[in-house]
Image: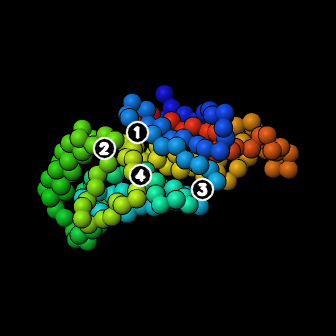
């Protein structure tokens, strides 16, 4: 099963696009012409490493789709900038594995918010289980928004690519198999 399914011409009206999160009650529908930026960033907010996709539009709301994973032993060692003993590394790994397991059970697609440390006002948030799926969603949203050539048709020469064989965001539904 694919992690991301893309359905072109999913809507009669092509002014909008949709992102659906399978097996959840979460979805987003937006207006293509309102998008002013699509960004991807990575940061650490202890105890998590976060990869975040933002869709900025003309309105008041920001769409934030992210993946968060507990910091692992390597991340912790780098953060502490200290040498660790093998027994310390083993215990940190065991604790990290336990936290990761609990995290997956509790927060498969549940948004994690840190009030009052971060603002979430006017933010529409979704959480994805896999950072690989998140990166794929970002890549596809960007390609469709920028109207890139549809390489699935094996078009090798940009000059020969016709308008009809270009990707378009309008009318497209992205379904994330979360």
Q: Viewer-nearest of labels 1 and 3?
A: 3
User: Residue 124: which numbered mark, if any?
Assistant: 4
Mark 1 lies on residue: 26
How far is disc 4 from disc 2 in space, using C-alphas? Answer: 13 Å
The numbered mark, 1 or 3, whose residue comes first in the sequence reads 1
* Vertical order, 2 against 82 (above or below): above
Mark 2 lies on residue: 110
Residue at 20% over, 42% down: 102
The answer to whether the residues at label 4 and label 2 have Cβ atoms under 8 Å apart is no
Q: What element carries label 3?
A: helix
**Residue 80: where, in percent of width, then height?**
23, 69
The numbered mark, 2 or 1, whose residue comes first in the sequence reads 1
The answer to whether the residues at label 4 and label 3 have Cβ atoms under 8 Å apart is no
**Residue 41: where, in percent of width, then height?**
46, 61
The numbered mark, 2 or 3, whose residue comes first in the sequence reads 3
User: Residue 34: which numbered mark, if any?
Assistant: 3
How far is disc 1 from disc 3 in space, using C-alphas? Answer: 21 Å
**Res 177 quadrant in image:** top left
The answer to whether the residues at label 1 and label 3 have Cβ atoms under 8 Å apart is no
Q: Answer with left or right where residue 13 lies relative to residue 94.
A: right
Residue at 52% over, 59% down: 59
């Amino acid at each position: 099963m694919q992690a991301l399914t893309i359905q072109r011409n999913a809507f009669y009206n092509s002014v909008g696009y949709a992102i659906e999160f399978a097996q959840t009650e979460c979805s987003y529908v937006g207006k293509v012409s309102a998008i002013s930026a699509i960004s991807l960033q990575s940061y650490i907010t202890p105890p998590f490493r976060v990869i975040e996709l933002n869709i900025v539009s003309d309105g008041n709301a920001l769409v934030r789709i992210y993946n968060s994973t507990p910091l692992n032993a390597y991340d912790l060692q780098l953060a502490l900038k200290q040498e660790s003993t093998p027994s310390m590394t083993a215990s940190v790994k065991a604790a990290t594995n336990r936290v990761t397991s609990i995290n997956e059970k509790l927060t498969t697609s549940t948004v994690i918010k840190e009030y009052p440390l971060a603002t979430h006002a006017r933010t529409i948030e979704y959480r994805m289980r896999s950072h690989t799926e998140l990166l794929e969603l970002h890549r596809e949203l960007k390609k469709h928004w920028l109207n890139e050539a549809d390489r699935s048709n094996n078009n090798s020469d940009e000059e020969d690519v016709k308008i009809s064989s270009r990707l378009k965001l309008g009318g497209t539904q992205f379904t994330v198999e979360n």
